[in-house]
Structure formats: structure tokens, C-alpha cells
Image (tube, rainbow, N blue to C red):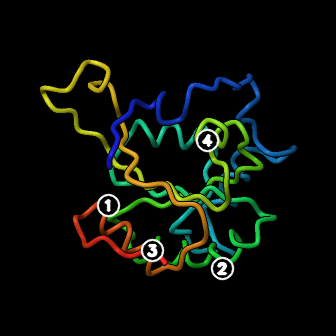
Amino acid sequence: MMKSMSLSMLIGTMAFATSNAFAPVGNTPSFVHSQSRLFAEGGEEKAAPMVTGAELEIMLTEWDQPLVVDAYATWCGPCVLMAPEFEAAAQALKGKVRFVKLDTDQEETMAARLNIMGLPTLLFLDKYEPKEDDPPEKQTASAVLKDRIEGALRKDMIVELAEHYFFGGPKPELI
């Protein structure tokens, strides 16, 4: 069952943001911190870059492609095991689906607003296209949460789920 929701409904009604909620980590300048999240060790651009809560919020209002968010933590074993699978899925669907990673320890406020309770959590989000007969509260919706999955997945399953939710492919069977 697909649910349409406004941005505020999508990220919850919790308002924990403070003036420094989205400040860069430590004393690292934001440009340097941002660059390290966008490029792999070899210098090539990551297909699934890390984003801040503020960057994710912008993505949820400026749609150009469907979005898959990996909410993870560096201390989480299944998250670490799934990281290369998520990057491989992002490479496979590059140009069709946008993949991003959200570190729930660095972005606690956004993780709370997204109601992340288990790790890793994948969010499959698409742009909401309002219909003429939709009630007024749905007319302002910007995103549709197609699915929310907790637990590590392999590349093939992530790709199959994206194909299903965003392009009408067959529904894969989750193991």
C-alpha cells in the first residue's frame, strides 16, 4: 500500500532542530567534509554519497529521480556488510535512481524525524504527483514512501526492489 505524504509528514512532526543541528563534523571545514563524502578512496565519484540531514531535506523537495536512502551507522555490522552491496546497486541504477547514505549517528535529528528504529533501514521514495480529486492536505505532498525495509540486503535485491517500486517491475520475494 502506497501512502502519499507531505514533507513534514514524511520526516515526522518531531522538531528537535537547533541552530547547529546540521553543522559540519568537528573542526573540518564543510567543503572538505562534503568532498570526502562524495569520492571513493581511488578518487572516483561515489554512486551513493553520504548526505547530511539538511541535504536530504532539500532532496525531498527537489525531485529529479526516485530516491533510495540507506540509514546506517558505522558500528553496525549488517550496515558495514551491506555498504558495498548498496554502492553496487547505486552503480547499476546510476542515472535512473538516486542513492544516498545517511549516518544516523552524525544525523541523529534527521534519523529521529525519519523514525529510524533499526539498522540498516532502506527508504524507497518517489515524487508524489497530486491528482485533481485529492483532498487539500494531499495536494502539498512532495514524496511517496514506497517501502521501508529494515535489515541488510544484497545488491540484486536492492535493484529488484527499485525496479519494482519505481519502474513497474515484478515484486521480488524477500527472504
105 relative position to 65: left or right: right
- Residue depicted at 58% across the width and 41% down the height: 114
Q: Earlier in the sequence, mark 1 or mark 3?
A: 1
Which three-letter amino acid code belongs to the residue tagged 2? Gly
Residue matched to label 4: 115
Q: Amino acid at mark 1?
A: Tyr
Q: Which residue is mark 3?
A: 174
- Position of residue 66 measured from the top left corner of the image (x, y, whole percent): 36, 54
Nearest the eye: 167 or 53: 167
Give the label on residue 165, or none: 1
Q: Which tag, 4 or 2, sits closer to the chain's start?
A: 2
Q: Which numbered disc flags the more N-terminal residue, 4 or 3?
A: 4
| Percent of width and height locating residue 34 | 66, 52
Q: Could you say which is closer to the camera, residue 96 or residue 36? A: 96
Mark positioned earlier in the residue sequence (3 or 2): 2
Q: Select label 4 or label 2 by which is in front.
A: 4
Mark 4–mark 1 distance (CA, rounded to whole Å): 21 Å
